[in-house]
Amino acid sequence: MRPALVRVRRRFFCFALAAAAVVALPAHAAFHLWTIGEAFSNADGTVQYIEFQALTGGQQFLSGHTLTASGGTAPTRSLSFATDLPGDTSGKRFVVGTPGFAAAAGIAPDYVIPAGFLNVGGGTINFAEGSDTWTYGALPTDGRNALLRNGSSAASTPTNFGGQTGAINIAPVSGPDVNVQGLWWRAPAGSESGWGMAITQQGPAADTIIFVAWYTYDTNGNPLWLVITRGERVGPNAWSGTIFQTRGPAFSAVPWDPAQVTATAVGTGTLRFTDANNGSFAYNVNGVLQTKDITRQIYATPAGTCTIPAN
């Protein structure tokens, strides 16, 4: 074979290998071509989100990368992406949000961050080890507007990877909390008969706490009793807390041994009420995120009422 022909073939072969490597790379590792588009927080940081927009396709491989937020006196907050996004990213957006985000926005976030992840007074968001960084100013806290990347503010329109667009309007209201003590179930009434919750509300009218007993079923259809032992007030007519699953001795045990009772944290729950008879319940239980409208369960009229002390 002529030497010149051999050199040409070798060069072609090396070029083909290099091209194949370049083509194959995005299918394994592309994650960095996202831009941070907007950020939102209410005044107390319980409802927050960050929206990202893809610059091109093939950027779904977020697993193992991190999102951090710094600012204020608290240490840097960090989220490690545990999973990839579920498909190609061309024309896509995704959202990270706090546990209270789903109930406020009406859509589920793609990843969950803890309440207070963003410093309301300003800070820095660092996506995927510096792939995109945004040092932002004070966030609007009117309960409706988000801060845009260009520094302006506009009505919040978070869009998740599934293409669902939410809207948040939780402007603070004055006055004491409404009375939410009683039995609650899925709205509209009777639409999901078989599960429900009992809420006990105590404390001064402007700073009540709630205890929630949630009666439902597990994935095998077995009865499941979950509780929020202390739902802290996170805003007007809104409470949030850790959800526990409990185990203990049989009801017939004699003597009853309190030392055998255990409580295991399985998630978080946030309840928000528009009035004394209607609200929503957003929860994350063992990684399952859902939001359901709820209504007071009326089984006799007139319904009884409880009075919350003014102080």
Image (cartoon, grey):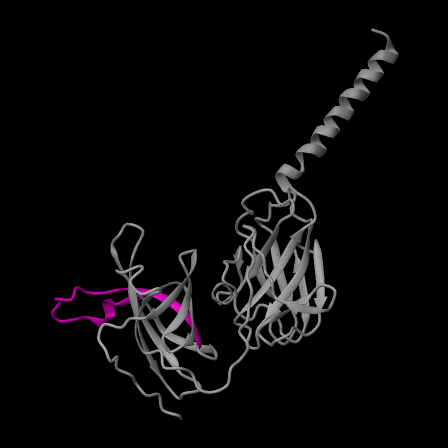
Q: Give the residue at x 67% y 55%.
A: 129
For the C terminus, which image quadrant? bottom left
* Circle count: 0
Q: Give the residue at x 56% y 51%.
A: 163
- Quadrant in the rendering for residue 204: bottom left
Determine whether 94 is above or below 200 in the image. Answer: above
Q: Position of residue 76 (x, y in %)?
A: 62, 67
Q: Position of residue 161 (x, y in %)?
A: 56, 51
Q: Position of residue 27 (x, y in %)?
A: 63, 37
User: Which residue extends farthest bottom?
Assistant: 311
Based on the picture, tell me whether residue 262 belongs to the magenta stretch: yes
- Camera-nearest residue between 101 and 9: 101
User: Which residue extends farthest front?
Assistant: 301
Which region shows up in magenta? Answer: 238-263
Q: Position of residue 39 (x, y in %)?
A: 63, 65
- Camera-nearest residue between 64 and 229: 229
Q: Give the residue at x 86% y 8%.
A: 2
- Quadrant in the rendering for residue 146: bottom right
- Camera-nearest residue between 20 and 10: 20
Relative to 242, 18 lies left or right:
right
User: Which residue extends farthest right?
Assistant: 4
